[in-house]
Amino acid sequence: MTNERSPKTLATLGLSRRDFLIVGTIGVAGAVAAPGLSGTVRAADMASPATTAAASYPVVDIAPLASIEPGAQIAFNYPDPDAPAVLLALPGPAAGGIGPDNRLVAFSILCTHKGCPVNYLPERQMFVCPCHWSSFDPAKSGQMIIGQGSQPLPQIQLRVQNGMVQAVGIDGLIYGRHTNIL
């Protein structure tokens, strides 16, 4: 007589392959859902990294409102020296725009595809990436028109205070970062 145990199989456990997959799927789904079922969900748990850092964005003066001519392109860095951006004075109103006729907007100029600096082409009224030709519309919140970009260009939130145009935050995530504030 031998004391060897025979290996347990699905059949010896009374489970079909289908039953095993159903039970396994339910178990995995339960493990994923369990943290959210505690009854307490904090806003910070649901916020993106770009949103959670919003309270700590710096206020940066860009230019006096009175000095910004139609068609102007003003380069600046936001929210830190390693984040190139541009303020545009568009010919017409824009989503998220400020100032006269809501025509002033600002964006990170790092393409959302591979991080190449985009160029604003005023004759086409769009940003174009010289690396892979992704194109973005600054009048429509930096929405991608064509190309490999994965998201719209991050739009910089602007305000006018005491006649000065200021950067105060960012909608979207700057290319190559886990959070906009380093």
Image: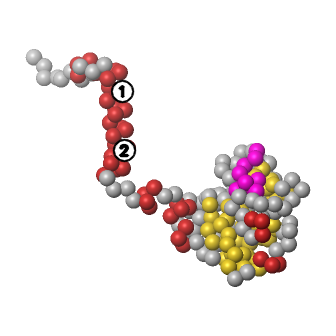
Find out whether residue 47 is within the magenta segment.
no
Image quadrant in which you'd find residue 110: bottom right
**Amino acid, disc 1:** Leu
21 over 124 or under it: above or below: above
Q: Is residue 65 left or right of residue 179?
A: right
| First along the sequence among labels 2 and 1 | 1
Quadrant position of the C terminus in the picture: bottom right
Q: Residue furthest left?
A: 1
Residue at which label 2 appears: 33
Question: Badge 1 local density, few (<14 within 10 Å), some, or many (20+)?
Answer: few
Residue 159, percent from left and from top: 67, 72
Give the camera-side residue of 81 and 59: 59
Q: Secondary structure at mark 2?
A: helix
Q: Is residue 71 left or right of residue 53?
A: right
The span picked out in magenta is 137-146
- Distance from Cα at disc 2 to Cα at disc 1: 18 Å
Residue 131, percent from left and from top: 78, 51
Residue 176, percent from left and from top: 63, 58
Q: Secondary structure at mark 1?
A: helix
Image quadrant in which you'd find residue 82: bottom right
Give the camera-side residue of 26 and 178: 26
Residue at which label 1 appears: 21
Q: Residue furthest bottom?
A: 162
Q: Is residue 11 left or right of residue 126?
A: left
Residue 148, percent from left and from top: 71, 45
